[in-house]
Image (tube, grey):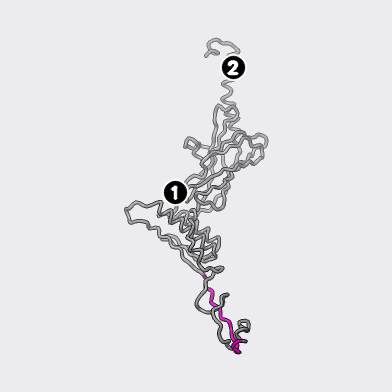
Amino acid sequence: MAAIRTGNNLLVIVLAAMLAVVPVSGFVSRGSLKRLSFSLEVPEHVYAGEQVILRIAVANGKRLVPSFFLRVEGPGGRTGGPLPGSIRAPFPRSRKRATPEAAPARSILDREVYFPIVRPGEIRTALLPRSFPRRGRYTLEGFRVSTRFPFGFFERGDLVRAEGEVVVYPSPRAVSPYFHLLPFLPGALESVRPGPGENLQAIRRHREGESARIIDWKATAKTLRLMAREYARDEDSRFCLILDTRTREPGAPAGDEGFENAVSMAAGIATHFIGEGAAIAFLAPRAYLPPGGDARLLDRMLRALAVIAP
């Protein structure tokens, strides 16, 4: 008002410099947000309540101009409303498995990450500690990137589109010490029937046509008869883990804590038996996994338990 009313040249110059800050700030911040791509790396196995490290990477595709003071956060930002953006970012899509028992989706990013400067053609990474309180699916709907460069008076932001999800496994509950006392051999149990195995069951008369490898020479010398060793047959230790998801009668309130304890116990039993080398199957009202004893079956079983619902 002073510059307009007095017509003083110095005040007019000061007013013009102040007004020039607005378009210059928008132009520079807009250029700082151009040609940026983002990616998010998550560990392969994530358990509920366990702290993991997320790796967020930003790549500056510009040849000459660096990007300054970038803040990367979830698509909702601090205000909860995403901004319409035009930047596209490549993101590796994870395989989604259709299931009728999927849990409600939640966001992966829960805090902000800052990048002071990303030079032209450079890729900068930041580590973000994160713990997921509950099991289930957590989705990534995009990134919100913003900057206050160069003057800090205004904030410019864009929404970067991206897709991805993280399946958080239930935390395996410690099993009873009784399970550790089970007579597990490497994937086999001792049977009462004779057959190929490693445990000696009895010493008997050698039959015609049998291999000479099973002859017990000490017993033969004592009895002056040809004696043979007979072993107990090894049977595969196969188990079936059954999780009944019908927790209460229709119309009654569902007990979330009791159901989550059951899911955690099922995850602990599956982890224990597969770790002992036993073949285990999984059965639920809407899910079935055939018997197996490798790490891939454990991963599939934990995935099924991660999204199962009462």
Name which quarter of the figure residue 57 lies in: top right
To which residue does mark 1 refer?
104
Q: Position of residue 244 (x, y in %)?
A: 40, 60
Name the dominant secondary structure of the magenta segment. strand
Look at the numbered disc 2 and give the secondary structure of its residue.
Answer: helix
What's the CA distance linking mark 2 and mark 1?
Answer: 55 Å
Residue numbers of the magenta segment: 222-236
Residue 232 lies in the magenta-colored region: yes
To which residue does mark 2 refer?
14
In the displayed structure, 14 sits above or below 53; it is above
Drawn side of residue 174 relative to residue 251, left or right: right
Q: Nearer the viewer, mark 2 or mark 1?
A: 1
Q: Nearer the viewer, residue 11 or 128?
A: 128
Which residue appears at 50% of the width and 50% of the height? 48
Residue 147 lies in the magenta-colored region: no
Which residue appears at 54% of the width and 77% of the height? 232
Q: Position of residue 110 (x, y in %)?
A: 51, 41
Residue type at mark 2: give it: Val
The answer to which of marks 2 and 1 sits earlier in the sequence is 2
Which residue appears at 46% of the width and 57% of the height? 265
